[in-house]
Amino acid sequence: MASKKKKGKHTVSGEIYHWSYVLVFITALVMSIIHWQKSQYLFYIALFSYGLVLFGYLAVKKKWKNWLGAHIGGILGSYIGIVTTTLVVNIPRIPVLNELPILLFWFLPTIIGTPFIFKVGNQYGPKKEGNF
C-alpha cells in the first residue's frame, strides 16, 4: 500500500500478495477439513477471504466500472479476513489475551479495518464535484 499506484512495485507486490493468499487459502482449506470439528470456521473464512482477494484482483485485471473501489475494498477486506483468522487461531495460546472474550478478536479487525477501507477508498476514489 505504501508504493505508488502504477505499474511497478505496487503491481509486483499485488501479484505476490495474491499468489501468497492462494497458498494460504489452500492451506486453510486442507487444515480445516483435516481438523473439521475444531476448525470448521477456517473453511468459511478462507472461502470468504479469498473471494475478496479474487474480487480485488480481477477488478484490476478486467477494469470494471468503479474497478478501483472494488480493488481497494477486496484487497483490504481480505486483509481484515486474514488478520481475523490469525487472531482467532492464536489468541487462545497467548497468556493474558486468552482471558479476554474470543468474540472481541472476531470483531476487532473489522471494527478497525472498515473505517480504513473507507478512508483509502475516498482518497483514491472519484472526486465529487461541489455545487458552489
Image (spheres, helix red, strand yellow):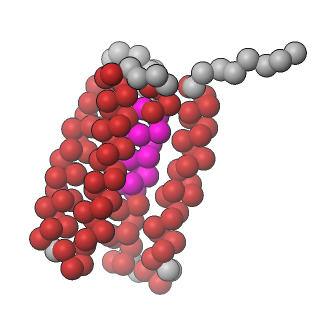
Residue displayed at 51% across by 56% down: 110
Q: Is residue 121 visible?
A: yes
Provide residue 82's location: percent of width, then percent of height: 35, 54
Provide residue 36's location: percent of width, then percent of height: 19, 74
**In this picture, residue 86 sits left or right of residue 24:** right
Where, by quadrant of the figure, is residue 93 drawn? bottom left
Residue displayed at 33% across by 70% down: 90
**In this picture, residue 99 sits left or right of residue 27:** right
Identify the main secondary structure in magenta: helix
**In this picture, residue 130 sits left or right of residue 67:** right
Where, by quadrant of the figure, is residue 98 drawn? bottom left
Asked if 59 appears above or below 18 in the picture, the reply is: above
Residue displayed at 43% across by 52% down: 80
**In this picture, residue 129 sits left or right of residue 7:** right
Q: Which residues are magenta?
A: 71-83
Provide residue 54's location: percent of width, then percent of height: 30, 38
